[in-house]
Amino acid sequence: MITIQNNVSLRPYNTFGIECKATYFTTVTSPADIIELIQHPVYQTHPHLILGGGSNILFTGDYPGLVIYNSIKGIEEKQLDSHRVLIKAGSGENWHSLVMYCIDKIMAALRTCH
């Protein structure tokens, strides 16, 4: 179940550390949270912004709506055949960590080939 908070500082959610506030704030951790959220009156009646790691945004003032912090995590692997693997990642995964995960998997596979 989602919780919508009022008047939340966005300083911890942006890499510039800019102090500003969101009128409303919530965190989603699953697709079910999103389904619940889009039915909520605050979502339906206020502007909304989806926020990830906060490294590609520069706040210049308070946000007069709902900030949705994406914390949908998880990395899954599916072997497609002997040469291909499908990686499925949650939309809230850290990009750098996901790339490093994939590189580690490739390097491990290369070591087993030799």
Image (cartoon, rainbow, N blue to C red):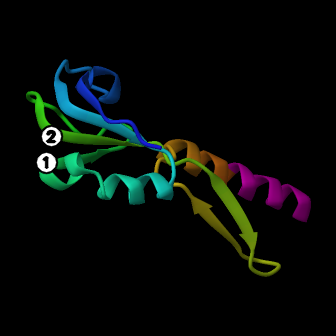
Q: Which residues are magenta?
A: 104-113
| Residue 70: mark in rendering | none
Disc number at residue 65? Answer: 2
73, above or below 39, in the image: above
Hey, what amino acid is under mark 1? His
**Vertically, is 21 above or below 106?**
above
Judging from the image, what secondary structure is the residue with disc 1 in? loop
Residue 3 appears at what percent x and percent y? 38, 36
Residue 110 drawn in magenta: yes
> Which of 11 and 9 lies nearest the eye of the viewer?
9
Residue 33 image position (x, y, % from top left): 45, 51
The residue at 68%/59% (across/down) is 76
The reply to whether residue 76 is visible in this rendering is yes
Q: Which residue is mark 1?
A: 46
- Tell me which label, 1 or 2, sits earlier in the chain: 1
Q: Nearer the viewer, residue 28 or 81?
A: 28
